Image (cartoon, helix red, strand yellow):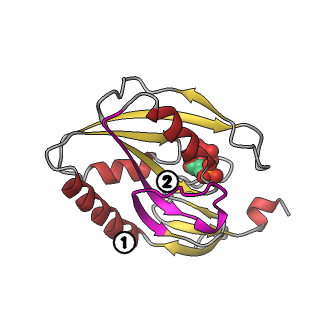
Amino acid sequence: MDDFIDKILISQEEIETRVNELAKQISKDYVGKEIRAIGILRGAFIFMSDLIRNISVPLSVDFMSISSYGDDSESGGVIRILKDLDKPIHNKHVLIIEDIVDTGLTLQHLKEVLAIREPASLRVCALLDKKERRIVNNLEAEYTGFVIPDQFVVGYGLDYAEKYRNYPFIFVLKSKYYQGI
Ligand code: PRP
Ligand code: MN
Ligand code: MG
């Protein structure tokens, strides 16, 4: 096993099973509707591609890229749009797709920005939820894959310094690889 892996938190098989369950639930909930799936770059792209391939209602995709000001210190929720949607979402059934909800600041801001555009509905599907880290109150994704502990996880789209997104499972990174010691 690669030396930087502390432990595998969610295996490829567990991800596949859960992603299929989420897709089934979403397909059921949106019967008779068309989904506009919005992937939040970059972390969501792998989850999104697996999820939407298992959704059976009509669907189109768009992408948004945002960044929070500052680094890992608390930014006060100021978030900048680096790439906006290509298409309007007025009257569309929007489903935001995220890899992880952590403090919740990204999602809070995104929901505010998108709600102003008056979609027919606005929901969130997040693969991971690090609930313990939440600083925004009353922010829950309508669809959540796994609630995880506050550990340094990467893989399946999630990065540390842009690395490890390509691993097909979610793992805890050994601390010496992110603490630089
Ligand atoms: C990560 C993750 C979420 C966000 C969650 O993205 O993909 O989008 O942070 O954090 P929050 O709940 O504390 O706001 P990141 O900014 O690292 O960009 P990336 O998706 O390109 O890795
Ligand atoms: Mn992200
Ligand atoms: Mg990141």
Q: Mark 2: which secondary structure?
A: strand
Q: Quadrant of residue 28?
A: bottom left
In the image, residue 24 lies in the stretch drawn in magenta: no
- Up/down of 103 relative to 83, above or below: below
Residue 169, horizontal then vertical, whole percent: 48, 65
Residue 68 visible:
yes
Residue 131, horizontal then vertical, whole percent: 58, 66
Question: Is 165 situated left or right of 14 in this image?
Answer: right
Residue 133, horizontal then vertical, whole percent: 66, 63
- Up/down of 158 relative to 88, above or below: below
Question: Is 127 situated left or right of 8 in this image?
Answer: left
Most extreme residue toward the left, as rendered?
A: 32
Which residue type carries mark 2? Asp
Disc 2 target residue: 99
Q: Quadrant of the N terminus?
A: bottom right
Q: Which mark is residue 37?
A: none
Which residue type carries mark 1? Glu
Q: In which quarter of the image is residue 18?
A: bottom left
Q: Residue at x 52, y 33 (%)?
A: 113
Report crowding for label 1: few under 14, some 14 to 19, many 20 or more residues within 10 A (C-alpha): few
Disc 1 target residue: 13
Q: Which of marks 1 and 2 is in front?
A: 2
Residue 111, horizontal then vertical, whole percent: 49, 41
Q: Could you say which is closer to the camera, residue 108 or residue 85? A: 108
Q: Could you say which is closer to the camera, residue 163 or residue 28? A: 28
Q: Which residue is drawn at 54% across and 46% down?
A: 107
Does ligand 1 reach within 8 Å of label 2's beta carbon? yes
Q: Could you say which is closer to the camera, residue 62 or residue 104? A: 104
Q: Which span of residues is magenta-colored?
A: 119-146
